Image (cartoon, helix red, strand yellow):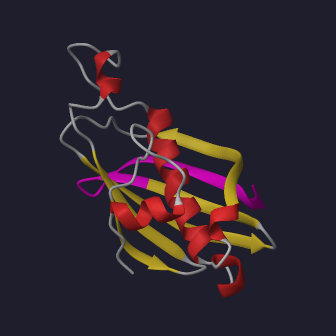
Amino acid sequence: MVMDVVEIQKILPHRFPFLLIDRVLELEEGKSIYAYKNVSISEGIFQGHFPGHPIYPGVMIVEGMAQAGGLLAFHSLSEEDKADIENKVVYFMSIDNCKFRAPVRPGDRLEYRLSVTKHRGNVWMLKGEAFVDGKLTTEADLKAMIVDK
């Protein structure tokens, strides 16, 4: 399943400047997602992180993984729950084993790959990885819950 930014915005409540996914290239319900964000020097975050040496913040990478995980969880809902998607929200419960392996810079295509490690009821456990040019930049174990707004 491919999703563009318009379709992503129908599911995620995030908007500019905090929507951190540009496109979903693959999504297998209940299993995995492959999405990306194009990192641009025009993003306001680079005014302060860091002048003269722009590095995309690690917390933003983890948030992008979390947003991709939210898309995966929402798309994995039952058809009945999908019909009520505007009344649901994903809350992240924990981020564990987070490691930053390499910096992400303007001009990079930041690719998110997440897979479900466990799913019980409305709680999702995900293994998240972020890559640039096939090189692992960030990894983390994420735990999230889908709840009514």
Indicate whether residue 40 is drawn in magenta.
no
Towards the viewer: 16 or 109: 16
Q: Is residue 113 visible?
A: no
Q: Residue at coordinates 67% horizontally, 57% vertically from top-left? A: 89
Query: Residue 135: horizontal and vertical position, in percent?
Result: 30, 52
Residue 57: percent from the left, percent from the top? 41, 30
Q: Which residues are magenta?
A: 130-149
Left/right of residue 20 with respect to residue 145 in the rendered view: left
Whole-percent x and y of residue 148? 77, 60
Residue occupying the point 21% across, 31% down: 42
Q: Eyeballing the image, is 36 above or below 57?
A: below
Residue that sits furthest to the bottom in the current view: 79
Horizontal arrangement in the rendering, residue 17 relative to residue 46 (left or right): right
In the displayed structure, does residue 81 sit left or right of residue 101? right
Q: Nearer the viewer, residue 89 or 98?
A: 89
Where is the N terminus found, in terms of image quarters?
bottom left
Q: Is residue 91 shown above or below 127?
A: above
Q: Position of residue 32 (x, y in %)?
A: 51, 74
Q: Quadrant of the C terminus?
A: bottom right
Residue 77 visible in rendering: yes
- Magenta stretch: includes residue 142: yes
Query: What residue lies at 60% left-to-right and 70% top-to-bottom?
Result: 74
Total labels drawn: 0
Q: Nearer the viewer, residue 138 or 76?
A: 76
Majority secondary structure of magenta residues: strand
Residue 43 occupies which quadrant of the picture? Answer: top left
